[in-house]
Image (cartoon, rainbow, N blue to C red):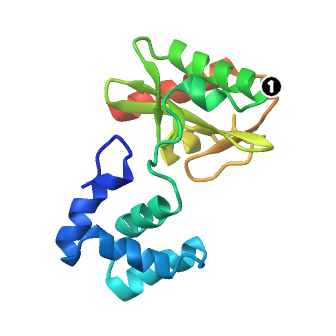
Amino acid sequence: MATSSGDREAYWPAIEKKHGLPMSHWFDVMAEISDRKYPEQIAYLRENHGFSQAHANALVMYTRGSKSSRRFTSVDDYLAPLDEQKRATVTSILSAAKAASPGSEVVIAWNKPMVRLGGQYLLGVDVATHHVLLLPLSADVIDRFRDRLAAYPRKKKTVQVPVDWKVDKRLVADLVSARLAELD
């Protein structure tokens, strides 16, 4: 089983146990298909060797040079490559979410900044080229605020706001409060 460290090598004992072959064998297999694209390599391992998605992904990504699934170790690491506008928007969203949940902290989870209280995630953000995603982690919370979110594109568990969004702190606080109530 993989560890929370994100190290892809944590999968090696499980792969060796399940398939009965040392990792050197699997590295040789990957060398043979190194010219293929990522999805083709994943499919090859799954279809021809019975790999799970997680094991295939760990092996493929490792052989492509990604030794860890963790891209960011802190919120500052996440914010560093962003332009000033995106950093300001994300920082304001996270501040509003923290203010709505005293005692909460901002952490990196799933390679995104997330506001967490105890062991429960309340709200996260993710930055794309032309928008910022609010991640209330709940379809019910988004549905509850459908009218107030009508101006923004929504998916089941995400809300898309512009990168230059003048953060609606009351809306962010209400989303967090609704998520807290849902978790109780």
Give the quarter of the image for residue 116.
Answer: top left
Question: Relative to the observer, which residue lies in front, 184 or 106?
Answer: 106
Q: Which residue is mark 1?
A: 85
x and y percent of residue 160 in the render?
71, 42
Give the quarter of the image for residue 40.
Answer: bottom right
Q: Say which residue appears at 40% left-offset and 86% top-offset.
A: 47
94 horizontally vs 104: left or right: right
104 horizontally vs 174: left or right: left
Indicate the amino acid at tag 1. Answer: Gln
As helix, strand or loop, the secondary structure at mark 1 comes to helix
Q: Where, quadrant-wise, is the C terminus in this rendering?
A: top left
x and y percent of residue 145 in the render?
61, 37
x and y percent of residue 1 in the render?
24, 55
Label 1 neighbour load within 10 Å: few <14, some 14-19, many 20+: few
Q: Say which residue appears at 46% left-offset and 83% top-offset.
A: 44
Look at the picture and state if 60 lies above or below 37. Answer: above
